[in-house]
Image (tube, grey):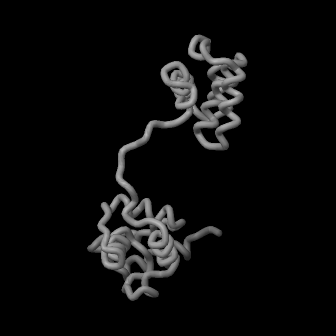
Amino acid sequence: MGRLDDITLEELYELKEQINEGKPRERVLAAIGRKQGDQLDMLAERHGVVEKTIRNWLDRFEEEPIEQAPYDAPRPGGPAKIEGQDREQLFEQLQQPPTELGYDQQAWSAKLLLHHIKEEYGVEYHENYAYELLKEAGLSLRTARPQHYEADPDEKAEFQETVEKNDPN
């Protein structure tokens, strides 16, 4: 066991009571399981992770104070540029088709969203973040299926007709 020798089961149970949910709770539960003699492979299966992740979780309890071990270190990154009411308003706007807001497009694209945010809120984001905003708003990105520039619409229609005629069903 080694990693958890300096921590009692009671301390882990006490810590578990202070943490409601999420990954920190999973880490404490894994430590409790290991302290009770569960094997790494069983813990990994129970928590839906690989054994290396379980080892990493348990290492935290050896390297950090018990109160900090379940939690991730703060990650770099600035505060959100659009927060609170503005963010809620943006997500409400995204539930409408862009035509309702005066745009010519029928669906939201990353570029249209970035344009809208810049015009409406005076904020600029990287294109990658636009995809995250769309996802956070509960939208999925749909793109048009590309068509080759030399494709002939008449030949395509003829092909479709031929396929339909030859379909055995």
The quadrant holding residue 43 is top right
Q: Residue at x 62, y 28 (%)?
A: 44
**Residue 116, image x, y percentages:** 35, 76
**Nearest the eye: 103 or 34:** 34
Residue 52 visible (yes or no): no
Instruction: Compare residues 119 and 70 and report the one nearer the observer.
Output: 70
Which image quarter: residue 28? top right
Horizontally, residue 91 falls left or right of residue 123, namely right
Q: Is residue 142 above or below residue 5?
A: below
**Side (left or right) of 60 relative to 15:** left
Q: Is residue 118 left or right of residue 159?
A: left
Residue 42 vs residue 136, the one in the foreground: 136
Left or right, residue 10 beside residue 93: right
- What residue is at 32 percent from the left and 63 percent from the top? 125
- Residue 158: image quadrant is bottom left
Q: Is residue 11 above or below residue 89?
A: above
- Which quadrant is home to the C terminus? bottom right
Count of picture labels: 0
Q: Position of residue 129 (x, y in %)?
A: 37, 59
29 vs 130, nearest the viewer = 29
Q: Position of residue 27 (x, y in %)?
A: 60, 32
For the point 66% across and 38% down, the residue is 18
Above-or-below relation of 76 to 5:
below
* 122 versus 46 height, above or below: below
- Residue 153 percent location from the top left of the image: 36, 80
Give the quadrant of the N terminus: top right
Taking the view exactly as shown, the residue that stands out farthest to the left is: 150
Asked whether residue 85 is in view, the answer is yes
